[in-house]
Image (cartoon, rainbow, N blue to C red):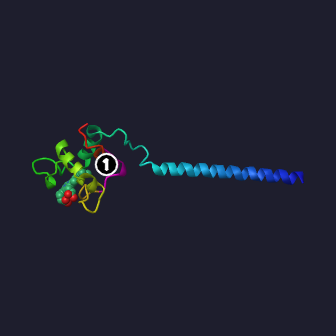
Amino acid sequence: MQNNMMISHLLKAAVALCVAILVMLSACSSDSEDEVEPGCDLANVTYSETIVPIMETHCNTCHSGASPSAGIVTAEYEGLREVALDGRLVGSVNHDPEYSAMPQGQPQLDECPREQIAAWVDDGAQDN
Ligand code: HEC
């Protein structure tokens, strides 16, 4: 009798431990789902440090110089600000069906740079 009770106590403790571990595991996985992307810095987005390098890598080959595509100059602040504030910048990089998908003829930008562009636009597309 004494033995049976000990076993049942042990079983209850083991079940409680398993439940606790499961709760912790699920808390961890839902935490990481909330994050945009691990290591993607959205807190310190600036035009000069964040946006300019993205434009140089993916956009300026077509959107600069004497005859920029669609008359849009992503290589200069004024030009980029214009398409940022009218929604075309975020719409085109996010492949929103109302806009032409950018960068044209190339794979869509990764989630992190797209989130950084959106963060910069949401913050007023400042020249910072
Ligand atoms: C290979 C050349 C090329 C590259 C690279 C390119 N674009 Fe474009 N872009 C175009 C052309 C051509 C158009 C005009 C025709 C069209 O809308 O499809 C255009 C149009 C646009 C428009 C207007 C879209 C609309 O729906 O009105 C925006 C905004 C834009 N580009 C931004 C970008 C950004 C930001 C990048 C980089 C992520 C980029 N482009 C990369 C060629 C390019």
Report the side of 53 relative to 19 (left or right): left
**110 magenta-colored:** yes
The residue type indicated by label 1 comes to: Ala
Quarter placement of the N terminus: bottom right
Residue at the limit of the structure toward the right, as seen here: 1
Q: Does the magenta segment cover residue 3?
A: no
* Disc 1 Cβ-to-ligand 1 distance below 8 Å: no
Can you tell me which quadrant of the image ligand 1 is in?
bottom left
Q: Is residue 108 visible?
A: yes
Residue farthest toward the left in the current orientation of the protein? 66
Q: Residue furthest top?
A: 128
For the question of whether residue 76 can be seen, the reply is no
Q: Is residue 39 left or right of residue 71?
A: right
Residue at image position (9%, 48%) is 66
**Where does residue 72 sit, x and y in percent of width and height?**
16, 51
Tell me which residue sits at (79%, 50%) in the image. Answer: 9
Residue 111 percent coordinates (x, y): 36, 51
In magenta, the rendered stretch is 107-119
126, 46: nearer the viewer:
126
Total numbered labels placed on residues in the image: 1
Front one among 86 and 99: 86
Give the residue at mark 1: 118
Residue at 23% over, 38% down: 127
Badge 1: residue crowd in 10 Å (few <14, some 14–19, many ≥20): many
